[in-house]
Image (cartoon, rainbow, N blue to C red):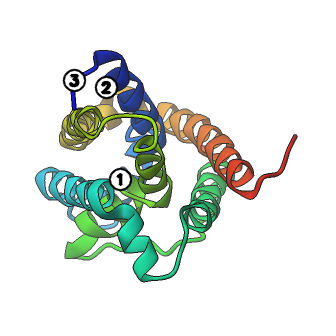
Amino acid sequence: MRIDWVQIATAFMVMFAVIDIFGSIPIILSIKSKGGRVKAWQVTLVSFLVFMAFLFLGESILKLFSVDISSFAIAGSFIIFILAMEMVLGVEFFKTETSKTASIVPIAFPLIAGAGSITTLISLRAEYNYINIFIAVVLNMVVVFLVLTLTSWFEKILGETGLMILKKFFGIILLAIAIKLFISNTGIKI
């Protein structure tokens, strides 16, 4: 295993796009406004542990439940699709958890370390060295921690209109990711 900065940068950008922490800011703020407590360190740690479990044991975990990577990816695409529809249409399909566990569910899992990002992580293993993926995940967790720590600052800077635009924009990107994930794992040719 050798460190390859091109692999790290590519894996970082792919994971960054799928994790979409900036697109999650409106959801995180919504959970906070409903009384949910979001602990940045806890979200980051749980997300990191989920990613590490799937980086090193992903296929074994899926085999334990007799699920292949494509099926997991298709299921993840449905979840991402519904989250995207919530963001674009402004309707609530998922009941938001506002208890003390809001840091873990739904933020750490499935928002950050969800089916889409886990599937992407497992897919990256086919192309990149473990060490490079590991470094890319660590860098993404640093970004996640910083964004979670600064969510109130983002709220002040962007304002209500800015947050709405951000939510719609990232909703469309999530929608495109969901469709791509679905198509690439079903074998449909466009």
**x and y percent of residue 147 in the render?**
26, 37
Question: Closer to the N terminus: mark 1 or mark 3?
Answer: 3
Label pair 3/2, CB-CB below 8 angstroms = yes
Closest to the observer: 185 or 90? Answer: 185
| Inter-mark Cα distance, 2 to 1 | 28 Å
Using residue 152 as the reference point, say whether residue 187 is left or right of it.
right
Residue 47 quadrant: bottom left
Q: Could you say which disc has been placed on residue 164 in the image?
A: none
Amino acid type of disc 1?
Ile
Sequence-first disc among 2 and 1: 2
Callout 3 amino acid? Ile
Which residue, as the protein is rendered here, is positioned at the far right?
Answer: 190
**Residue 1 visible in the current orientation:** yes
Query: Label 2: which residue?
Result: 8
The percent position of residue 30, horizontal first and vertical second, equals 39, 57
In percent of width and height, residue 140 lies at 28, 36
Task: Write the residue at 31% across / 53% down.
Answer: 55
Name of the residue lying farthest toward the left:
41
- Residue at 24% of width from left, 63% of height from top? 103
- Residue 36 appears in view: no
Mark 1: few/some/many CA within 10 Å (<14, 14-19, 20+): many
Residue designated by label 1? 28
Report the number of discs.
3
* Label 3: how many Cα within 10 Å (few below 14, some 14–19, many 20+): few
Q: CA distance from mark 3 to mark 2?
A: 8 Å
Give coordinates of residue 75: x percent, y percent.
Answer: 60, 67
Q: Label 3 near label 1: C-beta < 8 Å?
A: no
**Quadrant into which the C terminus falls:** top right
- Which residue corresponds to the image point at 35% horizontal and 51% vertical from the top-left? 29
- Give the class, few, some or many, for how many residues have Cα within 10 Å of label 2's Cα (few <14, many ≥20): many
Residue at the outermost front position: 1
Residue underneath mark 3: 3
